[in-house]
Amino acid sequence: MIILSIKNLGDITIELDYKNAPNTCANFVDLVNKGFYNGLTFHRIIKGFMIQGGDPEGTGVGGPDYGIKGEFRSNGVKNMLSHQRGVISMARAQDPDSAGSQFFICDKNDEFLDGNYAAFGRVVKGMDVVDQIASMPKGRNDKPLAPIIIEKAVAQNEPEPHPVVIR
């Protein structure tokens, strides 16, 4: 389980899906264990679609200076996890292997993303927190008007991640 503690809102608990996206899960756990997400924000919110975080710059273009192979169907990987409400997936640029640290959580069913984005887990507790975030006032580029801060991300009872395969 991964627990994202969101300042003043509560916790989001995520169960990872190693069967469908083993390298993506290993990358996420590795970043969590390194404290990468601590203090970062959800920089993009679109109610009725998703909330997005994991960018150290908070602009939507930052990351860990590497990309991992996109674990999804159009990139040659069989990933059967559908982008349903509560699913966490990797954000990326046009390059299918450009995901690094940015992720999004669906706040409704977004099956149109299936096969093109690496879904790698689901929220098992804290969808009320996701819904609160999705409903926050926002400005330009869907950026929240007030920072929504991930105070701490913690991995609990996760296997030791295998070395992450980067592209």
Image (tube, rainbow, N blue to C red):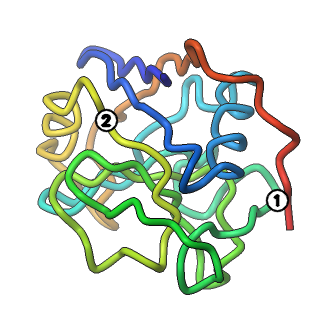
Looking at the rendered image, the disc whose residue lies closer to the viewer, 2 or 1, is: 2
Coordinates of residue 91 in the picture (x, y in percent): 51, 63
Coordinates of residue 148 in the picture (x, y in percent): 35, 33
Can you identify the residue that label 1 sits on?
A: 66
| Residue type of the residue flagged with mark 2 | Val
Measured Cα–Cα span from mark 2 to mark 1 = 26 Å
| Up/down of 120 relative to 11, above or below | below
Residue 47 figure quarter: bottom left
- Residue at the (61%, 64%) spot, across then down: 61
> How many residues crowd around disc 2 within 10 Å: few (fewer than 14), some, or many (20 or more)?
many
- Residue at the (54%, 56%) spot, across then down: 20
| Residue type of the residue flagged with mark 1 | Tyr
The number of callouts visible is 2
Mark 2: secondary structure: strand
- In the image shown, does 26 or 31 lie closer to the viewer? 26
Coordinates of residue 106 in the picture (x, y in percent): 27, 54
Relative side of 64 to 157, left or right: right
- In the image shown, does 13 or 158 lie closer to the viewer? 158
- Residue at the (33%, 25%) spot, across then down: 12
Relative side of 103 to 70, left or right: left
Relative side of 39 to 30, left or right: left
Can you identify the residue that label 2 sits on?
A: 123
Q: In what quadrant of the picture does the C terminus appear?
A: bottom right
Instruction: Decide which of tag 2 and tag 1 comes sooner along the chain.
Output: 1
